[in-house]
Image: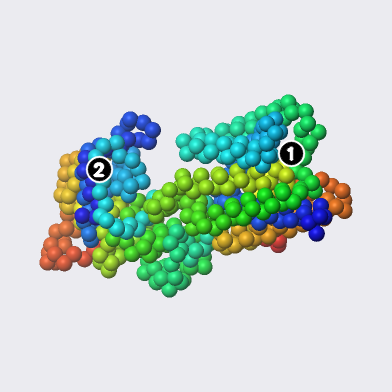
Amino acid sequence: MLDDFFFRAVLAGLGLALVAGPLGSFVVWRRMAYFGDSTAHAAILGVAMALAFDISIYAGTLAVATAMACLVSALVARGQAMDTMLGVLSHSALAFGLVAISFVPSARSDLSGYLFGDILAVGRLDLALIWTGAALVLALLILRWQRLVTSSLNEELAMAAGIDPRTERLVLSLALAIVVALAIRVVGSLLISAMLIVPAAAARGWARSPERMAAVAALIAAASVIAGLFSSLHLDTPAGPSIVASAAIFFLLSQALRRA
Amino acid sequence: MLIRADGMTIHRPGTQEAVLSGIDFRIAAGEIVTVVGPNGSGKSSLIRALLGQMGLAEGSVTRQQGLRIGYVPQRVQLDTAIPMTVRRFLSLPTRVTDAEASAALERTGVPGLGARQLTQLSGGQFQRVLLARALLRAPHLLVLDEPTQGLDQPGIVAFYQLIEDVRRETGAAVLMVSHDLLVVMRSSDRVVCLNGHICCEGTPQHVSGAPEYRALFGAEAQGMLALYQHHHDHDHDHDCDHDHGHAPSALPH
């Protein structure tokens, strides 16, 4: 079955969905949407570097996304005007990435694959990496769950309980960088943060506890992957955007059902 | 001594500007100590430094080995993005049993709120839930940073009454920052008046009579003093068996 490109795509998408739910919930709780954007956009720069130096795309995006996540995290800690700063970083990272990638002739034709993902081209190795990385991040989140939730709710309460919010922020930044690297083949640099935020936002209205929200978000993300891939197969639409579009439809449905 | 600070100086983060200087501070088991002072006088910085959340520029802070602190922070800004029931909140970051959780809520006068979302609580209910959470750690010391902000007058009086009850039952010391001068004067063992340094400290009656205190709080303090002394005399007439349970309506307006 792994020989089937479509089956591999579904598996890759589900691996990402599993971790995007919980991590995306933190992104929503901590209002880190722009943070996710800048880290994800930096991934394009990572792709350009990986191609130029002939190293793995995953290694390149992981390195650059980690650097970006740490930079943003440091700026947050220093209390910079977040909104503007993240906007500047996010779009500059994207612009520099696009400029850099134009210097790598072999990459120019694949550009849209890096921007919007190329999930149907996922191979066995990609699959192994995606599931390993997703399992790793998920384990990290579960191990530190109580600490992460406490410091997301209120940093002062966390500090009084002996939790250093800076450590938790760093953990989330690293988790985000790993997920960005994993997601670049699946939904691409431009849609990674959508994959994090949209399912979590859809889950918000249905959850009474943080655990429930993370689980529901993972389910919605998984359903979006399956719905997106099937619609891509039958309507011949691009896979990555179809997945995010499905998630957006789930979000609209969840809002409408709550109003009803 | 639960916490003791000697010659403590704290700078505003990232600057050389002193927020507090030369602070000597002690709090012993079972004591209720209240810190008063105008805005920007360093009250919150003092608390944070004593809790070890803030670096010192000079001096030292020593906390008793194994000291358990229950903390009720100032103006908790709860993010509404995070769904959270009262019951779940009580288990952050240390998990507690359902029985412990409902006992704590019962103790602080908000029984049966467990299933409620935090965002659906009134200000007074939320303060009591915060206190319940702090009590679940079986603290030696309760630290409350302006715990009654946003409460109305009866709510404030009831909350301090609860704090006194908790102290009596658990023997926990209480360190709090407060703006509610009148209530502070009635319910504290010791008052520390702060304005970048310790202006004066001592029993409520000593502090309310101190010129430094009057200079800081002006006319309001004069009024308070009159009220306090009235009360104080009144208490003395009754053989020192301090009854702190006077309803606010019993006070002359």
Helix, strand or loop at label 2? It is: strand
Identified at 57% across, 51% down, the residue is A26
Element under disc 1: helix
> How many numbered markers are drawn?
2
Q: Mark 1 points at which residue?
A: A115
Residue type beneath disc 1: Leu
Please provide percent x and percent y for residue A4: 82, 55
| Amino acid bearing label 2 | Ser
Quadrant where the N terminus of chain A lies?
bottom right
| Residues packed near mark 2 inside 10 Å, few (<14), some (14 to 19) or many (20 plus) | some
Q: Mark 2 points at which residue?
A: B60
* Side (left or right) of A250 relative to B45: right
**Which of the colour schemes (rainbow, by chain, secondary structure, one colour) is used?**
rainbow
* Residue drawn at 59 percent across, 62 percent down: A212
Residue at the bottom extreme of this rendering: B99
Q: Can residue B124 be seen in this view?
A: no
Look at the image and tell me whether residue B74 can be seen: yes
